[in-house]
Image: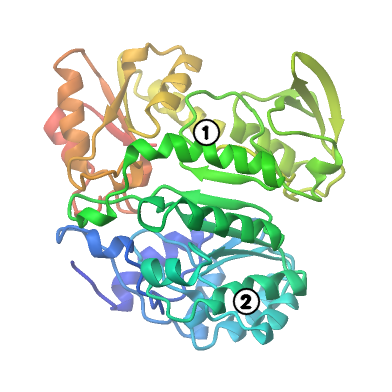
Amino acid sequence: MKKTTDRPDLYPYLLTAVSQDNVLPLTSVCNLGCIFCSHRQNPPEVNTFRLPPLSVDQILELAQFLDPNQKVIIGESATRLDEGEPFTHPQIITVLEKLRSLLPDTVFALTTNGTLLTAQTIGKLKALAPLEITLSLNSVTPAGRQLLLGDKNAARAAEAVRSLKLAGVPFHGSLLAMPHLTGWPDMEETVDFLAAENARTVRVFLPGYTARAPQNLRFPLSLWPEIITWAKKKTDQLGVPVIPEPACPDNLLPQIYGIMPASPAAGAGLQSGDIIRAVDDKAVRTRVEAYQAARQAANPRLKVERSGDTFTASMTKERGQAPGFVIHYDFATGRMDEVAAEIRRHRAKAPLLLASEFAGPLLKEVAALLSLPANSVWEVKNRFFGGSIRAAGLLTAQDFLAAAREAMAHQHCDLLLVPREAFDHRGVDLCGEDISTLTAALNIPVCAV
């Protein structure tokens, strides 16, 4: 795998992560050896980059490009940069303190495995509120942690969870669904533990694997619908949203999945299954639009449908505060408008929209809203990575080319739209191939939206 730690080469990726996604990369260093780590499964052609711990000055330089009105994300993947464990950074508390001075009111969203979160560190974190911590626990049992993470000191992460609760620091939990390795009881115990320790939500991720993955890591995809059903039952049982990701909704109905305890949504009497029809008298078309409208408003009034009846729910919250209801992510209406704008700009009569296998059903719903025929959407199979990889960000130009040629063998197309997640700030995919190769090969305009 091609790797580099040369800062001039990395700077454009760092700048893109910060300025476009509000992601602040600190390091690619990690202190665990997770068997499911995606970096081990990548084909050699993939261009990703490892980041040494940045200096405090380098981090503060990048921080100048952050949007203070959006939460700052630390510890998650950014463009082509391998994510690491933020608390391995030797000056993590200093970094956070200086960031807080620079951004006094901005939420810092940190993702951590929790093994380095001592009670003393958590005490320092509490003074840096507002924070939103996601603790990737994966398993709470000693056997599960040894198997999945190579963690021989299982008590550390569990103690970190308890310390977060004791300190009153809000946090979310997460785990990769691996019941075929750990057994269902391990996954159940982990979710129950997180809920009992006041996790705001628990996210359960589908384990993606490539064609290069060893057989024992190949999650049986036939299990995923069962896990989606199980997660909903746990949500109802525990009163805490247990969220399968991806949930793969096949419609745009603005329906609430779950309610966080002691949240504005809970105070307004909202329930799982409620459908949001309007926010402050403005109709909403998708789940994302409903959530964003409720988040951006102060004390919003929601028109809600429940069991065929319609009523108004008044929410008490500040502008920009999370409403506390959980939805499955579907499609941002701003992106829908971008699709429509590109079609108008090119005066296209027969646009072709390529979608990942995960997003295909949703994009067909979007196409219908844009008065496009169903055959304008074509799902793209991931031929490069193979395995269970279905997400747009891991598709390549060659994947798109194969799908477009297949579609164009059946129908006329005069514009190709592809998901922007597959390309970096230069319009280059994970293998280093430029999006312009699609235009040259197909002889039609190609746009990433």
> Badge 2: how crowded within 10 Å, few (<14), some, or many (20+)?
some
Applied colour scheme: rainbow
Q: Which mark is residue 206?
A: none
Which picture quadrant has residue 372? top left
Whole-percent x, y for residue 61 in the image: 51, 76
Which residue type does callout 1 highlight? Asp
Which residue is label 1 attached to? 330
Q: Is residue 88 above or below residue 439?
A: below
Residue 438 is left or right of residue 302, and the answer is: left
* Residue displayed at 72% across by 49% down: 322
Q: Residue at x 34, y 46 (%)?
A: 393
State whether residue 296 is above or below residue 164.
Answer: above
Viewer-nearest residue: 43 or 140? 140
Q: Is residue 215 visible?
A: yes
Q: Give the quarter of the figure containing the N terminus.
A: bottom left
Instruction: Sort mark 1 into few (<14), some (14-19) or many (20+) by Cα contacts within 10 Å.
Output: many
Residue 71 in sight from this viewpoint: no
Earlier-in-chain disc, 1 versus 2: 2
Q: Is residue 71 left or right of residue 11?
A: right
- What residue is rendered at 51% in x and 84% in y? 57
Task: Give percent across and percent down for residue 45.
Answer: 15, 58
* Depth check, front residue: 333 or 36: 36
> In which quadrant will I find the C terminus?
top left
Point out residue 100 in the picture as x, y percentages from the top left corner. 68, 75
Determine the CA span between mark 1 and mark 2: 35 Å
Mark 2: which amino acid?
A: Glu
Indicate which label's residue lies in the foreground, 1 or 2: 2
Label 2: state its secondary structure: helix
Q: Mark 2 — residue?
A: 159
- The part of the image, by quadrant, that contains residue 172 is bottom right
The image position of residue 266, as x and y in percent, is: 81, 42
